[in-house]
Structures are given as C-alpha cells and as structure tokens.
C-alpha cells in the first residue's frame, strides 16, 4: 500500500493556521493505520505548534507500528514465515557487510567438500540453519520478517521537498535529528528553543530548567524571582496535565511533545505542548459518568472543558502529582498572560479555550474532533516592563 501524501503549507502560530494543522492531524488520526508522507513544496516556514504536531504524529504512528510488528511474532504461522522467506532473507543477508565474511567462509567450507551433492537451495538452507543458532543473526532475521509482514504504519518527512530555509529551521530546532539519522547535529541556542519528546517518568527537573533557563529567560522577560518560579511551575503543570489526562490511560507507549520558539521580529516567545491521549473533554466525560451529580452538569464537550478549567476541579488523573492543587496554576498563568497581552490557547477534542479581553476563559467549538490536547502559550518580551506580585518589594 503506497503512502498517502500530505502537502503542508506555510504555518504560523495564529488560530487559522493552528486549526488547519489540527484538521490535517485529525484526518491522519482517523486513518492512522496507513503510511503518510509529508511534503513541503509549498512550505517556507513551520511554527512550533506545527512542528510539535508533526512530532506527535510520528511518535504515535511509530508506537502503532511497533505494535503491528509484535503481532507478527504472535502469529501461529510465524515459524513457517521464516521458512518461506528463507531465500529472500538469504539474499538480503548477502548485502549486509557485517555478515559477508561469515557467509563467504561457510560457502567455501561446503565447496571444499569432495563430491558434495548439495543443491544451491540445500546449501542456503544449511547455512541458514546454522545462522539461526546465532542470536544476533536470528534477531536480524526476525526483524526482517516483522517488517515484511507488519501493516505499514508511519509518518515520513520528505526532506528533498524542503527548501534550504525550512530544512535549516528543522535542523536548528532539533526536529529532524529525532526522525532522520543523518541529521544528528544538536540544536543551537537562538530563535528556535527546541523540539523535545518527553516520556512519562522523565526527570521533571530537566523540563523545569528548560522552561526557566532556555525559554522564559531573564533576557526576554523580566520578573521578580518569586513570580518567575511560580510562572515556571504553572507552565510545568501543563506538562503534568498532558502526562496525566493525556497519556496515562493509553494502551500503547505515548510521549508528550513540546516545541518552543523565539520570534525576534515580534519579540514574543511561544511554547507548544501536545499529547495524543484522547483529550481533556473525553477524560472529564468519562470521569463524570461515574458521578451522577457531575454527570448532570457535563452535557457536552464544551461544558466538560469549562468544568476542567475551573479552579480546584480535577478528575485526579490530570496530573502526575496526586496532591497538586488543580486550577490554581492555570488561574495564575491566565492572569499573567492577560496582563502581558499574550495568549494561552488550549485545543482539545472539538473545543478551544482562549483568554478573552476581560481575562476570562472563553470556550468555543471546533468543526473537528482532535483526540488529544494542545496548549499554546505566547508571551510578549518587552524589556521596559517588569513583572512582580502586587506589593512585592522591589528586587532590582
């Protein structure tokens, strides 16, 4: 089955482009048991939100493909698959540089036998039987059989269709190095703060230090030390929520994806956090189904998200830390973003939450169902403004 082609246009961190990219993501998620190739002929730039979504799709489909390969191992005819593909495996092995000396030596041993009557197929079978006793070689053969018989699932990125500008951007932010072996140069400090993939159980300190020292730096936004610590911890709560309501219930290994950028022209910093774990609305609805009183309040996804954003509400699965106060963190972050004239948008299922002019969350519906959650936070970098708590002693 040939890969389905997705042509990406230039993507910026505005609502229209984000929703268009989410729509593309939903189409892939709704047909995820296929192989997809992203082409970039029409694309000159990708926002951090678009990069994060591409990474999330690649991570998900990679996990699904591993599941498909594991299913091959469980097939009753797996042993016969090895036998049926013996000749093709042998030809493949002949092209493996590491195995050539071994195979050549085995062939020569047989040829040196006087009056041997082995046919070419019998020689191949004889060598393969010996190879099966070698764990390293056997694992190679098993991997090959898995790849030849598993459903082809995955997301690929056509580098040849990228302009040099776009390719350099994706190298610079460390995206390509995660998916294409030849691009292993570590990302540099600068405009793109970096693409990251986070597994549950990863060291939380590394995420906090990234937010504090690489994204929300003192050179970009001036805050009192106490306010900065609190804002960083509130942003970190977005990661914790993704680990909790996002990937904790998944039957396959999933990762939380993040990507940030620093827009020097508009002097803004943006951070995007994505998980493909089902969505906040779905999580709240499932939780409400176990509580008759709450179930009467949650009549649709919109009311589910409104409930989730209220101070103190929790499903007790939306964070790593069991004793973390829910709602408090997002309240403080919401107030800061509004004061900063920045933006905080949360896309989940068929809903979008954003901060309106009055500084309150406004929930609207989307024309598609994104089975995951994406939070996008943008902060203005105005060095003439110093942020601190009201009545806090001056720190400078």
Image (cartoon, grey):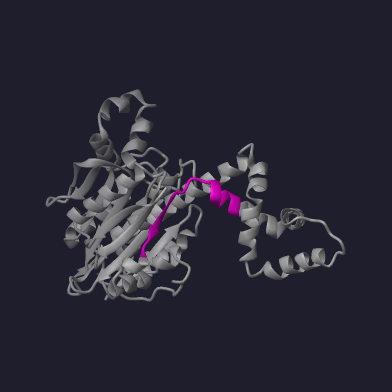
Q: Is residue 233 visible?
A: no
Numbered range of the magenta stretch: 144-158
Q: Nearer the viewer, residue 291 or 283?
A: 283
The residue under the point 24% across, 64% down is: 43
Residue 74 in the image: state x and y as whole percent: 61, 40
Q: Is residue 69 left or right of residue 346?
A: right
Q: Nearer the viewer, residue 261 or 158?
A: 158
Q: Nearer the viewer, residue 49 or 290?
A: 49
Residue farthest right in this picture: 114
The reply to whether the magenta stretch includes residue 154 is yes
Depicted 219 relative to depicted 154: above or below: below
Q: Is residue 249 left or right of residue 19?
A: right
Q: Which quadrant holds residue 26?
A: top left
Depicted 107 relative to depicted 151: above or below: below
Residue 200 in the image: state x and y as whole percent: 48, 52
Q: Is residue 140 left or right of residue 186?
A: right
The residue under the point 29% across, 58% down is: 49
Residue 48 in the image: state x and y as whole percent: 30, 62
């Amino acid at each position: 089955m040939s890969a389905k082609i997705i042509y990406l246009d230039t993507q910026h961190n505005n609502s229209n482009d984000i929703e268009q990219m989410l729509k593309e993501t939903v189409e892939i998620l709704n047909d995820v048991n296929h192989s997809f190739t992203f082409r970039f002929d029409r694309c000159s730039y990708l926002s951090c939100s678009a990069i994060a979504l591409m990474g999330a799709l690649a991570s998900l489909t990679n996990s699904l493909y591993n599941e498909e390969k594991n299913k091959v191992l469980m097939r009753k005819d797996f042993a016969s698959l090895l036998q049926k593909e013996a000749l093709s495996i042998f030809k493949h092995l002949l092209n493996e540089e590491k195995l050539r000396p071994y195979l050549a030596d085995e062939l020569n041993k047989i040829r040196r036998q006087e009056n041997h009557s082995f046919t070419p197929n019998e020689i191949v079978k004889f060598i393969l039987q010996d190879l099966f006793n070698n764990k390293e070689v056997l694992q190679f053969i098993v991997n090959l059989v898995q790849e030849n018989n598993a459903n082809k699932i995955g997301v690929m990125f056509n580098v040849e269709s990228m302009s040099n500008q776009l390719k350099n951007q994706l190298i610079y932010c460390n995206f390509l190095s995660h998916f294409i072996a030849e691009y292993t140069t570590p990302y540099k400090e600068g405009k793109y703060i970096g693409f990251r993939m986070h597994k549950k159980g990863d060291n939380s300190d590394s995420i906090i230090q990234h937010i504090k020292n690489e994204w929300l730096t003192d050179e970009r936004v001036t805050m009192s030390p106490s306010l900065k610590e609190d804002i960083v911890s509130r942003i970190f709560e977005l990661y914790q929520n993704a680990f909790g309501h996002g990937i904790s219930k998944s039957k396959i290994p999933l990762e939380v994806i993040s990507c940030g950028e620093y827009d020097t022209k508009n002097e803004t910093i943006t951070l995007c956090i994505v998980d493909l774990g089902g969505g906040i609305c779905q999580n709240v609805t499932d939780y409400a189904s176990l509580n008759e009183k709450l179930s009467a309040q949650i009549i649709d996804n919109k009311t589910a998200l409104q409930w989730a954003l209220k101070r103190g509400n929790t499903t007790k699965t939306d964070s790593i830390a069991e004793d973390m106060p829910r709602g408090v963190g997002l309240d403080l972050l919401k107030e800061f973003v509004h004061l900063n004239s920045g933006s905080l948008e949360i896309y989940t299922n068929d809903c979008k939450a954003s901060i309106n002019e009055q500084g309150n969350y406004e929930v609207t519906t989307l024309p598609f169902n994104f089975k995951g959650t994406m939070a996008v936070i943008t902060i203005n970098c105005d060095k003439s403004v110093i942020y601190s708590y009201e009545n806090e002693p001056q720190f400078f």
